[in-house]
């Protein structure tokens, strides 16, 4: 039986809130950066890009620098709750919007937010709940939300928002990337999953449980690799770059643009 861990909020499900998931190293950040560019080029704005991987590659992949991250806000809240709170939860909740807005880097067509790395370990449900509701308020101001995730959807539900309505799972040639897809497909309704094959042909991908189709293939691309290696923005790749064109086609086929 498929049990959904995603609770849809009726107020914000009408806009695409996409989480890019998959095993580490499969190409989530590359795909998110390229899809972000395609979305902006197609005038679907404003776009909110969320770098939710603690390692944080998306911000540099789009040629930006994150000065502030959200993790500090969460850690501060946890610290205060643990101490019994000189500052009340209410006061912190009131400050959250301000902190998030402070970490949000805004441009005309798009904005971005880096979640950063938290120093606090364990389950801090109240902190996460507060952060999520503040995040949902921010999300409501955007036409399109694209989240570069750590691996699975649980992390996004816990740390970012419960309102993801499309999950794009990136696969590479490894069986472990397929295992991650299978794990995700056991947690959510398969109809919200889109699968993208990076640097591998679909006929090489075996053991995908359930009837999940592959929306497209991104070829291995030397120029892209070089840009990434040298820390150049993937938004500066020539517009006829093959990997970029493949992402454009996937966005068209899946109705994102
Ligand atoms: N289609 C591709 N062509 C060439 N290099 C790629 C491609 N996709 C990913 N890479 C390279 O693979 C590495 C991992 O990609 P990345 O997007 O950072 O993975 P993830 O975010 O899933 O951990 C990076 O060095 C990136 O440049
Ligand atoms: Mg990444």
Image (cartoon, rainbow, N blue to C red):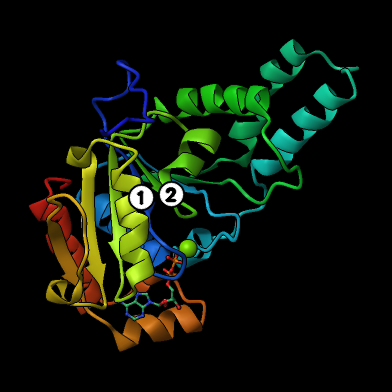
Which residue occupies the foreground of this view, 183 or 39? 183
Q: Residue at x 53, y 34 (%)?
A: 158
Give the structural element (helix, strand or loop) at label 1.
helix
Whether label 1 lies within 8 Å of ligand 1 gets the answer: no
Tell whether circle 2 marks a residue whose Cβ is less than 8 angstroms from ligand 1. Answer: no
In terms of depth relative to the viewer, which is nearer, 27 or 98?
Answer: 27
Q: Rate crowding at label 2 as few (under 14), some (14 to 19) or many (20 or more) other CA atoms within 10 Å.
A: many
Please tell me whether mark 2 sits on a helix, a strand or a loop. loop
In what quadrant of the picture does the N terminus appear? top left
Query: In terms of image quarters, where does ligand 1 lie?
Result: bottom left
Which residue position is annotated with label 1? 183
State yes or no: discs 2 and 1 in contact (Cβ < 8 Å). yes
Q: Position of residue 111 (x, y in %)?
A: 45, 44
Q: Residue at x 51, y 29 (%)?
A: 135
**Is residue 241 left or right of 83 when viewed as pictured?**
left
For image coordinates 12% across by 62% down, the residue present is 249
Q: Specify few, some or many for label 1: CA neighbours under 10 Å numbering under 14, 14-19, or 20 or more.
A: some
Quadrant of residue 186 in the image? top left
Locate residue 32 relative to residue 220 in the image: left or right: right
Compared to residue 68, the image places residue 192 above or below, namely above
**Residue 235 seen in render:** no
Q: CA distance from mark 2 to mark 1?
A: 8 Å
Residue that lies at the very extreme toward the front in this rendered image? 1
Residue 10 visible from this viewpoint: yes
Sequence-earlier tag: 2 or 1 = 2
Residue furthest left as drawn:
253
74 with respect to 159 (left or right): right
Q: Which percent across, then down, holds residue 133?
A: 53, 21
Identified at 35% across, 80% down, the residue is 224
Numbered circle sitting on residue 152? 2
């Amino acid at each position: 039986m498929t049990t959904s861990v995603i609770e849809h909020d009726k107020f914000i499900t009408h806009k695409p809130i996409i989480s890019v998931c998959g095993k580490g190293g499969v190409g989530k950040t590359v795909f998110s950066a390229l899809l972000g560019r395609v979305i902006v080029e197609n005038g679907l704005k404003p776009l909110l890009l969320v770098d939710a991987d603690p390692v944080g590659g998306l911000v540099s992949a789009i040629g930006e620098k994150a000065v502030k991250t959200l993790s500090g806000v969460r850690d501060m809240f946890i610290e205060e709750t643990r101490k019994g709170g000189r500052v009340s939860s209410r006061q912190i909740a009131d400050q959250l919007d301000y902190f998030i807005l402070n970490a949000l880097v805004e441009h005309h067509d798009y904005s971005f937010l880096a979640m950063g790395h938290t120093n606090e370990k364990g389950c801090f449900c109240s902190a996460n709940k507060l952060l999520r509701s503040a995040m949902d308020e921010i999300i409501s101001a955007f036409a399109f939300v694209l989240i570069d995730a750590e691996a699975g959807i649980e992390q996004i539900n816990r740390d970012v928002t419960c309102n993801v309505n499309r999950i794009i799972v990136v696969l590479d040639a490894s069986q472990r990337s397929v295992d991650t897809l299978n794990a995700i497909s056991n947690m959510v309704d398969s109809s919200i999953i889109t699968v993208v094959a990076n640097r591998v042909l679909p006929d090489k991908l075996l053991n995908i449980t359930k009837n999940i189709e592959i929306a497209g293939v991104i070829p291995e691309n030397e120029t892209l690799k070089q840009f990434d290696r040298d820390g150049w923005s993937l938004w500066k790749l020539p517009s006829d770059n093959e990997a970029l064109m493949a992402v454009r086609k996937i966005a068209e086929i899946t109705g994102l643009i």
